[in-house]
Amino acid sequence: MAVKIEKERSVLVVFPHPDDEAFGTSGTLSKYVDMGVPVTYACLTLGEMGRNLGIPPFATRETLPEVRKKELQAAADAIGIKDLRMMGFRDKTVEFEDDEKMVQLISGLIDELDPSLIITFYPGYSVHPDHEATARAVVRAVRRLPEEKRPKLYLVAFANDTEEGLGMPDIEHEVADMLDRKIKTLKAHASQTGYMIHDLEKAIAAGEAEAIERFAKERFYRYRWHDDFEESF
């Protein structure tokens, strides 16, 4: 059941790649922006190892980093995010960064921004190694805070065994009124999403229930602090 999106003090979004924000969180983030909530997006890499080069191709392996940098800025603009941080890590290497270095990076952002909510991936249920490394760092940084000072965590999970391990999502946001912004965000990442945008817009315009259900609702899990995932990290 969809829940009302409550106003937050500030929101910190941490994802490793440009376009990680687009599919599952851009409608929610747009709503926070429209509420006047400060939103900071820390994107760890430029996604320079992305598989796609546009359809038809308009980037090369050499130009893709700059293309994706511009796309990331355009996506932030579409959502309305003013504080976009490009953190300078290399795509597909986040998993090899020192764990303590990554935790300290997130802890520094938390100390600076004092977010009441952090949005990232769910460790163990986010498929890509860079996703997993990002999720681990965020959860570890938050775990180090006194319980009463921890920001809320809204976590995106999409592994095949997510419902088996975590059950149904804890939070569902209805973002149908933000579909235009969400599609603009997806379009901004044209090198990676061009293959799907035409069909998506057509399906939504036709009122296809499956497409609307997929893109007009955004689902998150709260972290299960009672389940200690530290051993699996």
Image: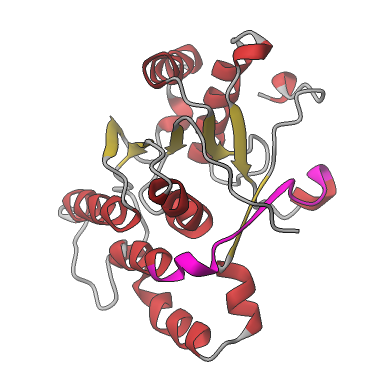
Which contiguous range is marked in magenta?
Answer: 165-180
- Quarter of the view holding residue 86: top left
Displayed quadrant of residue 2? bottom right
- Residue 52 can be seen in this image: no
Tell whether 172 sits left or right of 121: right
Going by the picture, which residue comes out furthest to the bottom?
206
Horizontal and vertical percent position of residue 226 = 82, 23
Please tell me which residue lies in front, 222 or 102: 222
Image: 124 above or below 1: above
Residue sitting at x 46%, y 15%: 107
Q: How is the image coloured?
A: secondary structure
Q: Residue at x 65, y 79 (%)?
A: 210
How far from the left and from the top, in percent, is residue 121? 57, 40
Which one is nearer the viewer's eye here, 160 or 174?
174
Report the side of 59 relative to 196 (left or right): left
Q: Is residue 174 magenta?
A: yes
232 on left or right of 53: right
Is any part of residue 230 visible from this angle?
A: yes
Q: How many numbered circles does the render carry?
A: 0
| Occupied quadrant, residue 101 | top left
152 is within the stretch colored magenta: no
* Residue beneath the point at 74% across and 46% down: 170
Is 151 situated above or below 154?
above
Quadrant where the N terminus sits is: bottom right
- Residue 39, given in percent of the width and then of the height, sits at 38, 38
| Residue 215 pos. (x, y %) | 55, 68
Q: Quadrant of the C terminus?
A: top right
* Above or below, 194 relative to 83: below
